Amino acid sequence: MSIKVNHHDLAAGVLGLVFSIGILFVNPVFATPYAGDYTYLGEFDPTAGEASSLYHVNLPTGAFSDWWVFDLDPAGMASINTVFLPTTDISNFGFTLYDVTFSTCTSVGSVCAGITLGSILGSSVTPLDYVTNIEFTPLNVGTYAFNITGTVVNTTGIPTKLYSGNLTTGPTPVPEPTTLALLGTGLLFSTVANRRRRKGAKAA
């Protein structure tokens, strides 16, 4: 007995699952669909673990370059992860995280103006062609932008091409007591060794 799979139904089911997961597990600022370069995701408090979904639907065939912007206050950690569907219809999928030295951003989903990019803070880790992420990275208070790039191809014949992902923030980890103790021990030995060297140099 053979089972026929309707690829359009399968794709629709996968897309629905991705969006359902995003809505269930991501709190609070849900971004509008891609609105243009430098779409504003909002300001996030990493001590509260605030996060946002992001997505771009109906990507045309060919290369694309999307920019997203967010503010962080206070300092903390941030990670970004994205998945492209259909999974075989993307190549060179990845992104780069920058700090922003100047910008004017208003409401969530609007396009930021006057963006001036600073230094590169990280680039994506891509275990699969259709999945890419930046692991939790410590960030100062400020404004940040990330550029999502890729090339859409047409291997499946499925008309809807999209990526969906999450920006997740969290507090900077506090070192465990054991780590602090080891650090303190290392500093103590270093201080003692330096004193001995000085005494030896004076005696000579």
Image (cartoon, rainbow, N blue to C red):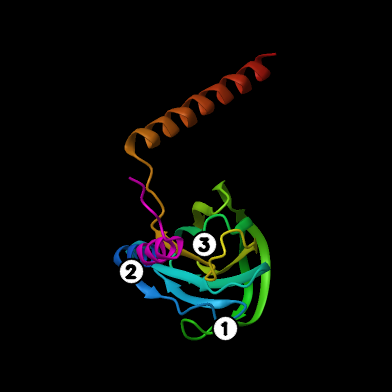
Q: Residue furthest left?
A: 24
Disc number placed over residue 111 in the picture, else none = 1
Q: Residue furthest top?
A: 204
Observer-side mark, 1 or 3, equals 1
- Residue 13 located within the stretch drawn in magenta: yes
- Near mark 1 (Cα within 10 A), the count class, few <14, some 14-19 or many ≥20, is many
Which percent across, then down, holds residue 16? 37, 67
- Near mark 2 (Cα within 10 A), the count class, few <14, some 14-19 or many ≥20, is some
In magenta, the rendered stretch is 1-17
| Secondary structure, magenta segment, majority class | helix
**Mark 1 residue type:** Val
Disc number placed over residue 23 in the picture, else none = 2
- Near mark 3 (Cα within 10 A), the count class, few <14, some 14-19 or many ≥20, is some
Q: CA distance from mark 2 to mark 1?
A: 23 Å
SS for dot 3: loop
Q: Judge whether 195 appears above or below 46 on screen.
A: above
Pointers 3 and 2 in contact (C-beta within 8 Å)? no
